[in-house]
Image: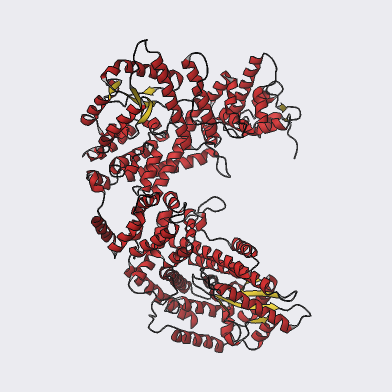
Amino acid sequence: MSRPTRAPGRLARYGFGTADGDGGARAADLLGPDGLRLWRPDEQEPVDEAAGELLAALSRAADPDLALRQLHRIVEAERRTSGGNAASPLLADLHADPGLRRRVIAVLGASSALGDHLVAHPEHYRALRTAPDGLAPTAEGRLDLTGEGNPVAVLRTAYRLALLRIAAADLTGGRGLEQTMAALSALADATLAAAYEIAVDELADGTERPRLAVVAMGKCGGGELNYVSDVDVIFVAAEDADLPAATLVATRLIAICGLVAWPVDAALRPEGSRGPLVRTLASHLAYYRRWARTWEFQALLKARPAAGDLPLAQEWVDQLAPLVWRAAERPEAVEDVRAMRRRIIDNIPPKELEREIKRGPGGLRDIEFAVQLLQLVHGRGDETLRAPGTIPALRALVAGGYVGRADGESLLRGYRFLRSVEHRLQLQALRRTHTVPTEPAALRWLAAALGYTATPGRSAVESFRAEWVTHAAEVRRLHAKLLYRPLLESVARVPADGLRLTPEAARHRLEILGFADPAGALRHLQALTGGVSRTAAIQRTLLPVLLSEFADAPEPDRGLLNYRKVSDKLGSTPWYLRLLRDGGPVARRLARVLALSRYVADLLARDPEALRLLAEENELAPRSREVLREGFLAAAARHTDPVEATRAVRALRRRELVRVACADLLCRAGALAPTPTRPDGTKRPAPGLAHVTGVGTALADVTDATLAAALRAAQASQPGPEGLRFAVIGMGRLGGYESNYLSDADVLFVYDPPAGSSESAASAAAHAIAEELRRLLGVPAPDPPLGVDADLRPEGRQGPLVRSIAAYAQYYARWSRVWEAQALLRARFVCGDADLGAEFEAMIDPVRYPADGLTREQVVEIRRIKARVETERLPRGADPATHTKLGRGGLADVEWAVQLVQLRHAGANPALRDTRTLDALAAAERAGLIDPMDAAEMAAGWSLAAQVRNALMLVRGRAGDQLPRHGVELAGVVRLLGRDDPGEFLDEYLRTGRRSRAAAERVLNA
């Protein structure tokens, strides 16, 4: 690569010149010998390594050009102060202190106003130095008022320094949004308190100190203040005698805060700006009891003591609380709140409506109004909802079941996103604004300040806009859903005392929800929620949501019982209930899984910690074959005892079975369905019952990994002669990647003796390995066993368990029958020696894919065997119309038909050589060997039968192929498959089976 010829071009790579459009020319001047002396224009590189680190830090700023300009101005101010070309203290500290460098550059690139402050006070950057213990400077909103001089000027300087620390922590990830809002609110409290004391000190001599309380309202009261905002307050005096001095103090406090930080707005007081600035406690109570409107009680949700006489402020809050929590019982209360929100939107200028992140549709006000209305309605009977802040209140609403978890999480994400945008907009110039800019340069800065970066095919601005549109649309939808929920008016009309159910009322409610044994269900609920422990309190907030999920299942009682079992095992662990409470859809996912599947409930009873899988979308995606094999082999390798090694492998297998089964159960659960992230960042649905081939493949991969790890342990336990090769060949459903949840592993064992060794010794060693493998996987343990079935070997159970590859070749060449060739159609290498596995597959290819196809006698033999299997193996009393495996149009019908086509034509058509039934069926259709209509009918029949078979195993927790025609098991299968009416589904199954059977018979008889 050729070396650039111009410094500006090289500097553009650091991001300089983007905003100015000069390719970095201005940056070259500021960084060069006449500027910061960080850049050598001749060599076109930083002057030293420290300069390179500083340039790299500047390149990461939201606006590198702004950060550089402001850094240059500060250094120039230092030079003017020192009176010459002395070394810059700031640059020296930036080189020596990486934390300081990160914080200063972040502030300079994000806020021109704070940069101006540092230009005026260059020494103030020291407030951002890393402490000797390596910690960042505290940013909790405390004021340092140790300076001398005019107290108002001292307060202003202290305020800016505290704000600088908060902004630096915010911009560098040292504080999250909620911590930043809390710090800004604490800074407002400290500023109000300091201004209060200055105002009191300025009272005329002899004036008695009044009892005056400053009550924070609005965002400050909620502990969620932003960078630039009016601070809403209400002034309360104790007695009439305090009013004259209290009014002077309040007036002066407002003036001081305006000079120091922000305007103080007292318009939320009774009668607004027309009323007196300060009222006594008694006057306030009289007004709110008689005249206050709904919006005024809504505003009181955020009231809290802030400054002045704090006990008086708390008394004011306590006295008004009963009035606040009765306000929703007014007939017009709910509609008043809705009307107020509509008026706010109507007052926004049309050209700003879509850019307003605070007042516009899908903005912050939508979230705040929805939360506050729910607080007013439900907070009468649930004191946990009486939180002044939007985020704590929303969390309480979610925890109490008043807002769905998914909805609550969406609102929280939207709130955080919108507040973050608001913070960055205001921080730039410390100017009150809530409108997203339209200018391209301003949008680029905003996207960069929020952390967006360009990706292939999408700019940072486009990424920001896409997320903004998504959040705004979701907030708008949920606002309408919550604010206009029909139940709100009904609940609001119920007196507060009526919100608490008696045991008799609770039993009646459980009957309505469909519990067959409401008394027993009530005992479970009392056991889960009884007492005053934190665990019981969290359970009380979770169970309303869980009961609704249980009620949607065919057996609500079983779901609640399973939930109690899991809770009894995990209730004392610190993460369990926290995960259910804070883990988004985890609680509802768990409820669905426990209510619908005995299989998963049994697995979770053995391994309750596996429910952590429900918390992460990517945890509900089956692991790849390679990841499984590596993980299982690594687990086995950590143990020298083969039993312990296999126990570890079986525990991993149990966890993977839970993973696949839960993804399967949740795939049709609407908002609960997992959507794992692809490597490219996009979302994809997790394999489920709708993707039965995906489930079969996932389960086969788990079995493959289990066998590979167990084989490794068996070979270590039973070492054979040097050079002995051993392989496991998958057969049946394992070989076809069509395993179900309770499948055994159908296998063949093959070995190849080392050259020059005794055949008998090699055979004995191979037998020992195979027997040890089967023993290890069958040892009694809490984990589900994996049966290893080798009955498909030559001569079946009468033949040797293990054969050499030469013996297999001899047998198949001389004595193999057509049904054995048919069984080999699914044979594939699973684990062991890969070369031996490939040799085995090559050896059996002429047997399973005969070059000349089948003779007429062989075709007749296959039809005869199928008829005998259908007659003899169908269980006595089974309904052939609804037996998923051997019934009409089920798995066997389609598999026999497809396998017959493979035996007849795969020798000449390699595309048919596939162990998977549906893939081979599709290949036969493409080759013109099966009519497309017949292929579609057979694929539909096989898929539906496989889906139903898997669903039956999940519902029952045991093997079974018979779809019942009525009862809770049929209802469970229907619900798992995403259908509504059992009768309609049964008709569909019978209809699909008839068509599949007819198509299969046409293929078999062709």
Left or right of residue 808, residue 493 in this image:
left
**Horizontal and vertical percent for residue 405?**
39, 49
Is residue 118 shown above or below 824? above
Is residue 882 shown above or below 229? below
Q: Residue at x 42, y 79 (%)?
A: 887
| Residue 486 in view of the camera | no
Q: Quadrant of the N terminus?
A: top right
**Horizontal and vertical percent for residue 71?**
62, 24
**Horizontal and vertical percent for residue 653?**
54, 66
Is residue 228 shown above or below 386? above
Q: Quadrant of residue 185?
A: top left
Q: Quadrant of residue 902?
A: bottom right
Q: Residue at x 58, y 27 (%)?
A: 66
Name of the residue lying farthest toward the right: 756
Q: Nearer the viewer, residue 740 or 440?
A: 740
| Residue 475 in view of the camera | yes
Left or right of residue 681, residue 883 in this image:
left
Q: Residue at x 72, y 80 (%)?
A: 762
Left or right of residue 157, residue 208 in this image:
left
Q: Residue at x 62, y 29 (%)?
A: 17
- Total numbered badges shown on the rendered structure: 0
Name of the residue lying farthest toward the top: 205
Specify the color scheme: secondary structure
**Horizontal and vertical percent for residue 83?**
67, 13
Q: Nearer the viewer, residue 67 or 263?
A: 263
Is residue 141 shown above or below 155? below
